[in-house]
Image: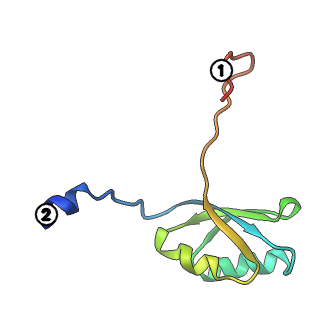
């Protein structure tokens, strides 16, 4: 297949997307959040109770985020819609 056709078929990744960062309790979560910001992550919420941080970053930053000390996982954030109350469909 010619290169031009291959390039057209490739899906363009968004410049930035939302991520959920799961952290360990080995370091204070506020310190991890600061290191994530230094690595290119725009922190949205710091959820100390469940050891997670949400925010946005470009796909090119994810490898750096995963290397931050205290980070256990970096996963794409996905929307969940359970529907309105009394709806026959829930998932």
Residue 46 image offset from top left, x and y in percent: 77, 64
Please determine whether, in this image, residue 23 is positioned above or below residue 50.
below
Q: Residue at x 87, y 74 (%)?
A: 25
| Tag of residue 4 | 2
- Label 1 environment density (alpha carbons within 10 Å; few <14, some 14–19, many ≥20): few
Residue at image location 64% in from the left, 40% down from the top? 80
Can you say whether 52 is above or below 77 in the image? below
Locate residue 54 relative to residue 62 in the image: left or right: right
In the image, residue 8 lies at what x, y percent? 21, 57
- Report the number of numbered marks: 2
| Of callouts 1 and 2, the N-terminal one | 2
Query: Do tag 1 and tag 2 residues touch (Cβ < 8 Å)?
Result: no
Front-lying residue, 46 or 26: 26
Q: Residue furthest left?
A: 2
Return the residue found at the far front. Answer: 1
Quadrant hosting residue 19: bottom right
- Distance from Cα at disc 1 to Cα at disc 2: 44 Å
Residue in the image at 43% along x and 64% along y: 15
Residue 18: % across, % down:
58, 58
Q: Which mark is residue 89?
A: 1
Location of the C terminus (image quadrant)? top right
């Amino acid at each position: 297949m010619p290169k031009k056709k291959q390039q057209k078929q490739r899906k363009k990744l968004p410049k930035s997307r939302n991520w959920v960062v799961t952290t360990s309790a080995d370091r204070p979560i506020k310190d991890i959040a600061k290191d994530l910001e230094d690595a290119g992550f725009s922190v949205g919420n710091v959820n100390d109770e469940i050891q997670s941080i949400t925010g946005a970053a470009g796909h090119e930053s994810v490898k750096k985020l995963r290397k931050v000390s205290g980070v256990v996982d970096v996963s794409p954030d996905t929307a969940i819609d359970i529907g309105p109350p009394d709806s026959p469909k829930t998932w």
